[in-house]
Every structure is written in C-alpha cells, then in structure tokens.
Image (cartoon, helix red, strand yellow):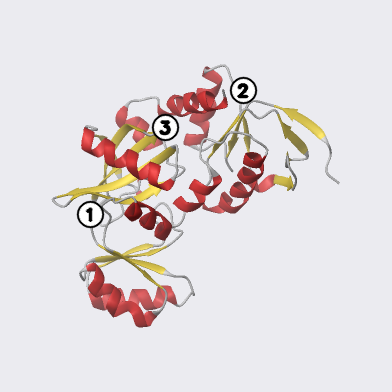
Amino acid sequence: MIEDRLMPMGPLILSRDQSLYSTRRLVEAARASGRDPLVADPTLCSVQVGKPARVTYEGALLEGISVVLPRLGYSSLTAGINVLRALELSGVPCLNSSQGIELARNKYGVMMALAGAGMFVPRTVLLNRPDGVDMAFEAVGGAPLLLKFLDGSQGVGVVLAESERSARSMADAMLAGGKPLLVQEGLRAARDVRVLVIDGRAVAAMERSAKPGEFRANIHRGATARSMELDAPLAGVAAQAANAVGLAVAGVDLVRGERGDAVIDVNASPGLEGIEQASGKDLARMIVDSAISLSR
C-alpha cells in the first residue's frame, strides 16, 4: 500500500543518478537561482492513472511541481516517459515533452522528421530483413557506410563498414537479433559538431575529435572537444533540427561538408560536461532559466 504522504516541491529533475555531471550542474544552477529541486529516479516512481494522475516517488506523493527537467538515459527511458505523460496530463510543464523525447530516441523517426522538414540528412535506408541489404547499399552509395540500431546512444549500436563485404556480414549479424537497422552513408568522420539548442536558439557549439582508432566522436568514448564559432548557418540548421523533433532543449550533431551541414542525430538529454568546458558558458543555468520561465 502506497503511503499517502505529500512532498511539496519546486523543480523536478528526472534522472537515475544525481552524481552525473549534467544532473549535478542542473541542481547547482537551480539552487543558485533560489530554487530547491528534487532529483527523482523515474524507475522508482509509481503512477496512479487518472486526471489528474498521481505520481509517487519512494512512497511520497509528488505535489506542487513547478516544472520538470527530464534527463533520461537508455535505462530510464520507458519509465521516464510514462512519468512525464502523467505529469503532462496533470498540467505540469515539462522542458522537453514525452513525445519529443520518445521521437529523439528513435533514429529512424529522427531522420524522417528532419527529412519531412526539408533538412539535409545522410542517405538512409531502414532495413528489416537481410534480403534487402544489396538494395540498401546501392541506395546509400556504397561503402563506407554506417549500420545503426534505432535506439542506440553515446555511440552504442553503431558500426562503420569500410567495404560492402564487411557491411553485409555485420548487417546479417545485427539483424539476427530481430531488430531493424539503419543503413546510412558514411558522412560521420573522426570530427563532427555538437550544437546545444535551448528554446529554439543555438547557444553553444563544439567540434569533437575521436580518439585514435575510433570513428565515433562521442565524449563518452574518449573524444576531445574544442570550442568553435557558432555562425548563423550552423545555428539556423541546429535550431531547425531541434524544432523538427519537438525539443526545447537538444544536442544536435552535424557533419559539415561541401554538400552542406548534414544533421546526423538529435539528442533529448545532451551531456553538458564537454560543451560547457569547451565553450566556457554556464549552459546549465541557461537550461534552468528556460525551465523557470516555462513554469511561470
């Protein structure tokens, strides 16, 4: 039986681990602005369906939430989206919506949303069966190419194939698990760009360089980052991408080339450590300020 206690509060940060850099920085920024946030692990929340819905955390009813700042990773995605839906139904403002976050975790959905908005994306094919491999390779222009699971993050579930022969064997192995793949032209190089967008405006950018022997330029995989100029074309593409996916706060990944700025991913819970250090900007405070404005 759930203990019906009340937990009056202000901002709610949904995160599995409050020691993570990004979560910790949001807490610090909220406190600096005079708010005392609660960090709640969404996997420890329970939801009683209704209108309004009742959300409890560790036996306490969450009441008086001014705004929600979601930080949902792979392990907390389903639970976090369910909690967000309940809070949205109850009229609580959420900095990123459950719908936007769910779309952002589906790489195929992101590519379709970007293409539907008329944006330049890599040539991409959704592959469900091994007998479609040859068609997919031809459609994306051959090797080198990328094979991606639809729900990967931080470079997990992404492989680079330097030849069609290796790509075919990789595709067969990955499809054996029954999960669809994206086959994508190999625009991602050892260097790419991450832009942070807040409230429809690009606020910071960094260029990421993969460590030697690694093609994925993810900070969690040892990539290094340096600040870069956020010019108007880059800022415009990043803001348009975040809007197409329906996110107020987003990390937009791009590859810059002769064909233009190609968007390769949009992240609903972008890490702050690399881009804060590279840009020297207090991005956590900007996110908190946006959340406070939304709560008003």
On screen, residue 6 above or below 131: above
Q: Is residue 183 left or right of residue 21?
A: left
Foreground label between 3 and 2: 3
Q: Please, what is the three-letter code of the amino acid marked with disc 1?
A: Ala
Name the residue that disc number 2 marks: 36
In percent of width and height, residue 167 lies at 29, 73
Q: Please, what is the three-letter code of the amino acid marked with disc 2?
A: Asp
Image quadrant in which the C terminus is located? top right
Q: Does the rendering let one see residue 263?
A: yes
Name the residue that disc number 1 marks: 189
Name the foreground residue: 85 vs 137: 85
- The circle drawn on residue 199 is 3
Mark 3 and mark 2 lie on one chain; the one further toward the N terminus is 2
Q: Are marks 3 and 1 in contact (CB under 8 Å)?
A: no
Mark 3 and mark 1 lie on one chain; the one further toward the N terminus is 1
Snapshot quadrant of residue 110: bottom left
Element under disc 2: loop
